[in-house]
Amino acid sequence: MRWTWLGWAGVELEHEGATLVIDPLGDPEAVFAFAAELDHDVPQVVPAAARTALAGLVTHLHRDHADAAALAAALRPGAPVLEPPASAGAAPEILGLAQADAELSAHGLTRQRVEPWEAARLGPFTVTALPATDGLGDPQVSWLVEAGGVRIVHLGDTLFHGAWWPIALRHGPIDAAFVAVNGATVRFPHRRPASPLPITMDPDQAAVAAAMLGARTAVPIHAEGYRVDGLYAPLPEPTAAFVRAAAARGVEAHVPTLGERVELAPQPVADAGRAA
């Protein structure tokens, strides 16, 4: 299996000529369009291969993870978007989902809701939705993708939780874990009173999660970018902090360059079961 780094939380996977995309982002400026007058920066991104993906996997319907235009550009005609269960709440509870949900509907994409631990076969890939905990209380899953004897997990921007052990026991060993590391705190109008605690894993928590998953390699995502005055405050230099935290826990960190392609080979038989 080969993975390509698309920037922010976006990853493209390829095996035997087939591709999948996870959380691609095509228009970073649109994420905080409602706060365009505020000082903010955006991450750099690159597009996935056009009109080839068998499916788009979405961890949650926040606009930086569910960019309808980026998904539509990557998907072959009729390919589905797999996403978490729908929220049972009403406005303003689901305000943070409204933009992405409306854009996905407007693009006419085929959408499929999945529950944690639900699996599907997509060409040479087996994909499984995994438990996750969203820092804003919105529905979220992580994704396991298996192909050619290789397993990767994409953790979206989940909080730290207790399902790392069951995931490792059911689906380990893990060859590459894509882990959010920016430990952002927020002051969104629809989530008040504001909390001083982060809504995503910080570098230390991400390193612990990767170690608990038994990941052979951990890739920091959701890292550099999106500091929005008064609204969204990531930690400074989270990637460097994660590399240090991962090393302290004996986890190999791979910091990708934009558009980098990495080939993953199956682990030797002697390593099998290490995660369990």
Image (cartoon, rainbow, N blue to C red):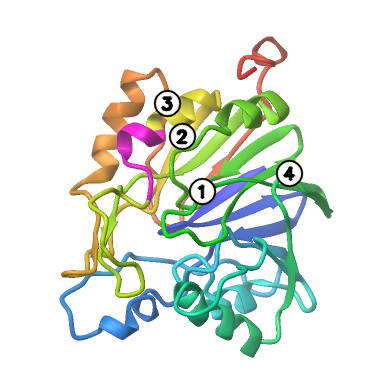
Q: Residue at x 61, y 36 (%)?
A: 264
Q: Residue at x 61, y 81 (%)?
A: 104
For the residue labelled by badge 1, is the local secondary structure a helix, a strand or a loop? Answer: loop
* Mark 3: few/some/many CA within 10 Å (<14, 14-19, 20+): some
Q: Residue at x 56, y 81 (%)?
A: 69
Instruction: In the rendered structure, find residue 133 and report the number of the disc placed on it.
Output: 1
Q: Earlier in the sequence, mark 1 or mark 2?
A: 1
Three-letter residue code for mark 3 = Glu
The quarter of the displayed image where residue 268 is located? top right
Return the residue nearer the eye: 212 or 79: 212
- Quarter containing the C terminus: top right
Residue highlighted by disc 2: 218
Q: What's the distance in space between the residues labelled 3 and 4, CA to CA?
A: 27 Å
- 93 displayed left or right of 105: left
* Mark 2: few/some/many CA within 10 Å (<14, 14-19, 20+): many
For the residue labelled by badge 2, is the local secondary structure a helix, a strand or a loop? Answer: strand
On the image, the x and y values in percent for residue 189 come to 30, 75
**Are discs 2 and 3 less than 8 Å apart at CB?**
yes
Q: What's the distance in space between the residues labelled 3 and 1, CA to CA?
A: 25 Å
Instruction: In the rendered structure, find residue 252 and report the number of the disc placed on it.
Output: 3
Q: What's the distance in space between the residues labelled 1 and 2, CA to CA?
A: 19 Å
Q: What's the distance in space between the residues labelled 2 and 4, CA to CA?
A: 22 Å
- Quarter containing the N terminus: top right
On the image, the x and y values in percent for residue 63 come to 46, 72
For the residue labelled by badge 4, is the local secondary structure a helix, a strand or a loop? Answer: loop
| Residue stretch rendered in magenta on the structure | 200-206
> Is 46 located above or below residue 173 in the figure?
below
* Mark 1: few/some/many CA within 10 Å (<14, 14-19, 20+): many
**Are discs 2 and 4 less than 8 Å apart at CB?**
no
Three-letter residue code for mark 1 = Thr
Three-letter residue code for mark 2 = Ala
Residue highlighted by disc 4: 117
